[in-house]
Every structure is written in C-alpha cells, then in structure tokens.
Image (cartoon, grey):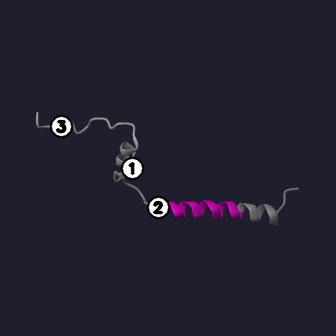
Amino acid sequence: MSSKKKNAPLPASSAGLLRFFEDETKGIKVKPEIVMAIAGAMIGVSVIIRIVFPAG
C-alpha cells in the first residue's frame, strides 16, 4: 500500500487551480501586460479613426 494514486482528481479549490496553471504547456508565452497594452492600443486606434473619419 505504499503506492499512491497519481492521477487522482484534484479538489475544486484554489490549490487545484494553482496546480493546473503551473503546468507547462506548448506555445508562445506572452505577459499579461503586453496583451492588455495591445488591446488598449487597438481600442485607442479605433476611437481615433472614428474621430478622424466620422460616419455620415
């Protein structure tokens, strides 16, 4: 009885979520600050376009 179940489901708590997000995954890694900056820049550009070229 010395072996434990390694594939046992984790409890639905913050500890389980932390363990899930700590797993390494394939793909590009982007900081959240960069994502927010790009989104803010796109919003800013769209507002400027609406001001410079009004629909009408």
Within 10 angstroms of label 1, few (less than 14), some, or many (20 or more) residues?
few
Q: Secondary structure at mark 2?
A: loop
As for residue 53 lying within the magenta part, the answer is: no
- Alpha carbon separation for disc pair 2 and 1: 14 Å
Percent coordinates x, y for residue 6 in the rendering? 22, 39
- Can you name the residue that lies furthest to the left here? 1
As for residue 39 lying within the magenta part, the answer is: yes
Q: Which residues are magenta?
A: 30-45
Q: Hey, which quadrant is residue 53 in on the image?
A: bottom right
Within 10 angstroms of label 3, few (less than 14), some, or many (20 or more) residues?
few
Front position in the image: 8 or 12:
12
Task: From the image, tell me which residue sits under label 2.
Answer: 30
Q: Hey, which quadrant is residue 13 in on the image?
A: top left
Q: Quadrant of the N terminus?
A: top left
Q: Secondary structure at mark 1?
A: helix
Please name the predominant secondary structure of the magenta segment in the image.
Answer: helix
**Front position among marks 3 and 2:** 3
Percent coordinates x, y for residue 51 in the rendering? 81, 64
Q: Residue at position x 40%, y 44% from top?
A: 14
Task: From the image, tell me which residue sits under label 1.
Answer: 21
| 25 left or right, relative to 49 | left
Q: Residue at position x 21%, y 36% from top?
A: 5
Amino acid found under the numbered disc labelled 1: Phe
Q: Quadrant of the C terminus?
A: bottom right
**Front position among marks 2 and 1:** 1
